[in-house]
């Protein structure tokens, strides 16, 4: 499938402007990041989109159901037209997600 392009955001989610114009680049990584960070209800047009990963990762790791988290991430990404091949929760509280746009 054709790679998605979008207006790019910096690490603080501010618009990146170069030479007086918005920076537009391949954006799949940015889309996935925003889905992971967003809470349900954050997107007016898509109120059911969002994993809320910050809140989930702040729970005690013992009480965090890793299978449920992986399922939630996969379903949210699939809803946004990504095929999820693998989701790994690393011990440092980081995620590794293997996906592709379909």
Image (cartoon, rainbow, N blue to C red):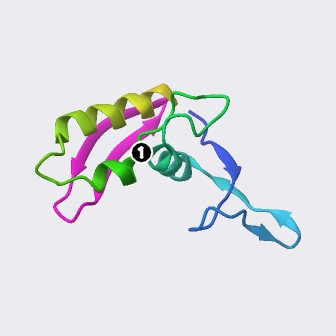
Question: Which residue, as the protein is rendered here, is positioned at the far bottom?
Answer: 19
Q: Residue at x 41, y 40 (%)?
A: 51
Q: Residue at x 16, y 61 (%)?
A: 91
Residue 69 rendering spot, x and y as whole percentages: 26, 39
Which quarter of the rendered picture does the N terminus lie within?
top right
Asked if the magenta segment contains residue 20, the reply would be no
Compared with residue 9, is residue 31 higher up or lower down, i.e. above or below?
A: above
Q: Nearer the viewer, residue 55 or 30?
A: 55
Compared with residue 94, is residue 65 higher up or lower down, i.e. above or below?
A: above
Give the structural element (helix, strand or loop) at label 1: loop
Compared with residue 27, is residue 101 higher up or lower down, i.e. above or below?
A: above
- The residue pinned by badge 1 equals 52
Asked if the magenta segment contains residue 90, the reply would be yes
- The image quadrant of residue 14 is bottom right
Q: Is residue 68 left or right of residue 6?
A: left
Q: Residues within 10 Å of mark 1 (few under 14, many from 20)?
A: some
- The image quadrant of residue 21 is bottom right
* Residue extent of the magenta highlight: 81-102
- The image quadrant of residue 68 is top left
Compared with residue 12, is residue 65 higher up or lower down, i.e. above or below?
A: above
Please tell me whether the stretch drawn in magenta is mainly helix, strand or loop: strand
Residue 46 rendering spot, x and y as whole percentages: 60, 28
Q: Nearer the viewer, residue 75 or 63?
A: 63
Residue 66 rendering spot, x and y as whole percentages: 18, 42
Q: Residue at x 28, y 31 (%)?
A: 71
Residue 36 rendering spot, x and y as whole percentages: 44, 46
């Amino acid at each position: 499938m054709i790679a998605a392009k979008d207006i790019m955001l910096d690490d603080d989610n501010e618009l990146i402007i170069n030479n007086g114009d918005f920076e537009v680049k391949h954006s799949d990584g940015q889309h996935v990041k925003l889905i992971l960070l967003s809470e349900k209800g954050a997107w007016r047009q898509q109120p059911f989109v969002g994993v809320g990963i910050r809140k989930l990762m702040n729970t005690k790791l013992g009480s965090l159901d890793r299978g449920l988290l992986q399922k939630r991430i996969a379903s949210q990404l699939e809803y946004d037209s990504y095929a999820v091949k693998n989701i790994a929760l690393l011990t440092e509280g980081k995620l590794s997600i293997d996906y592709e746009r379909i």
